[in-house]
Image (tube, rainbow, N blue to C red):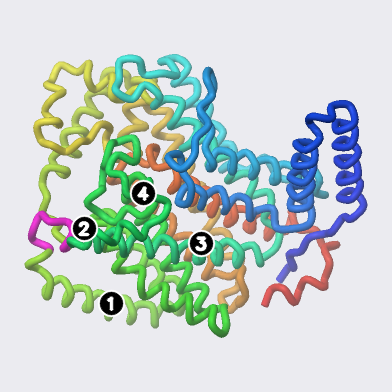
Amino acid sequence: MPVLGREHRDAPVWGAVAALTALSLLVGYLFPAAAPWALVGLAGAAVMLLWALRWDPAVVAWLWVLSYGLLDRPFWVWEIRGFFNMTIPRFAFLAAVAVLSVHLLMRRGTVRFGRALLWAMAALLICCALSATAAGWRAEGSALPTAPYFRFLESMLFPFLMFFLVYCAADRPQQIRTALVMFSVYGWYALYIGYLQYAAIMGYEGARRLIFPGYINQPSWGPNYGIHFDRARGAYAMANPQATLLIVLFFADLYLVRRLRGPYRVAAAIQAMLIPPAIFFTGLRSAYVAFLLGGMVWLWCAGRVRLGRVKLAISGLALLLVVAAFWGNLATQKRSIGGMAQKAPIVGRWILAQRSWEIFTHQPLTGAGFGHYIEAEHRLVSDPSLLARLGTGLATPHNLLLVMMAETGVAGLALTVLVFVLLYRQSLQLYRRLPADQEGWLSRGFVVVFWTAMAAYLVDAMLVDPLWDVPSNGLFWSLAGLMAGFNRLLEPSVLQPSLPAATAAQQA
């Protein structure tokens, strides 16, 4: 099998550091008052440069993804008049783009831009940008006037750009270990918060005093003013990002257990056992479906097919026994004890699906305009207050395909479907290129982990509007970039035989 590796280039690195040092000294000499800031800037620039050229540049992408669950907008925000407000995750994104861009510019070799998936993603971005430009980048007649540019920038442009940069930065199997271990480390924090929140929901209010940062305990945290505060939503503004992260983390832990040794392996196994209850604490029916689907994918694909079928049958029987034992809880409307009988959200989704079709029939080619669904829905002849009377709180159709169909028409819907089809094709190509008995971090098991992440994201996208869920988009598309990047490297026409053979030992 071809060997993946990377080259170290000392001269350009230290030459750039020397240039930055000279620039800092010049600024300090010409503007003495700015000398301290020049030194701080020098240190930051030098670290970013070394990171981009000598260390794993993809790490900054995972730091950006995890920053949404650590220090989001309520913790600190810099409000800039006439410009976008800056938060810690947005600064983390800019730092990640800077590091990965330097890595891309300084690397040797070429990147294949003629890939169908990249062109489809670019076309989808252009389609949505043109739609928002034609209808307006602000939804003036809506309760959410920032919807067009917020959804385009943070839920599409940023994740797609990070996909491309991680795709270009993928060059050694150890990057898989780094990403999964970083998620696992954050997972302990996510579990800690989730368990405390569930304890508070069940009546132990003092548990919230142990949660940091404190803004997580504010019912009004988030754009929807308290959505999912009655569920274990983790550090996020709603429960969906917490559920998606935990589902991905569960299967990542199963993958880590097979490859880590000693106390790290024990920690991954313990964490995997703690995750299913935390998924239950989110109270999301979509999360239950996604977790079950991910489990079916894992059992079927992660090992031998015959053994996978046996495990799948045993798991199915165990699930039926659990459902039978807890049917009394499941048949209630109380989410905290597992109730799944709430009808209002289902009726609300059905009504919004009908109204989405009505919007689409009015403008099938162009749609109502990207980010302008609420305005278009209010212009319909039927009573727009029906959903409010149902008490669902639904504003846009809880389905990615429906919202793209209504807002961007046939073109946006077709491009959205095409992007996911081509992304799955990339993963299938990588799965088939890797030998069935391949061990190490780059193996078929990693592709299966990605498939479970894709299942979690798509199930969520069929039952909610994922363009409001920035953390889940960042997580999924960054992980997708890593997968597609390794598929690119394993293409015979892209591999460079001159890469150091000494890295062969790193495959194990």
Question: Do callouts 2 and 3 mark residues in contact (Cβ within 8 Å)?
Answer: no
From what the image shows, is residue 76 above or below residue 282? Answer: above
The type of residue carrying mark 4 is Ile
- Which residue is denoted by mark 1 in the rendering? 315
Indicate which label's residue lies in the foreground, 1 or 4.
Answer: 4
The type of residue carrying mark 1 is Ser
Which sits in the foreground, 215 or 382? 215
The type of residue carrying mark 2 is Ile
Res 455 visible: no
Percent from the top left, x then y, of residue 175? 64, 62
Question: Do callouts 1 and 4 mark residues in contact (Cβ within 8 Å)?
Answer: no
Of the residues under marks 2 and 4, which one precedes in the sequence? 2
From what the image shows, is residue 374 above or below residue 190? Answer: above
Q: Residue furthest bottom?
A: 262
Identity of the residue drawn at 69% across and 41% down: 98
Percent from the top left, x then y, of residue 207? 29, 61
Of the residues under marks 1 and 3, which one precedes in the sequence? 3
Q: CA distance from mark 2 to mark 3?
A: 26 Å
Indicate which label's residue lies in the foreground, 1 or 3.
Answer: 3
Few, some or many residues within 10 Å of mark 3 (<14, 14–19, 20+): many
Of the residues under marks 1 and 4, which one precedes in the sequence? 4
From what the image shows, is residue 102 above or below residue 303? Answer: above
Identity of the residue drawn at 22% across and 35% down: 394
Identity of the residue drawn at 42% across and 73% down: 271
The type of residue carrying mark 3 is Phe
Question: Do callouts 2 and 4 mark residues in contact (Cβ within 8 Å)?
Answer: no
Q: Does residue 458 show up magenta in the picture? A: no
Circle on res. 201: 2
Which quarter of the picture shows residue 158? top right
Circle on res. 183: 3
Few, some or many residues within 10 Å of mark 4 (<14, 14–19, 20+): many
Region rendered in magenta: 330-337
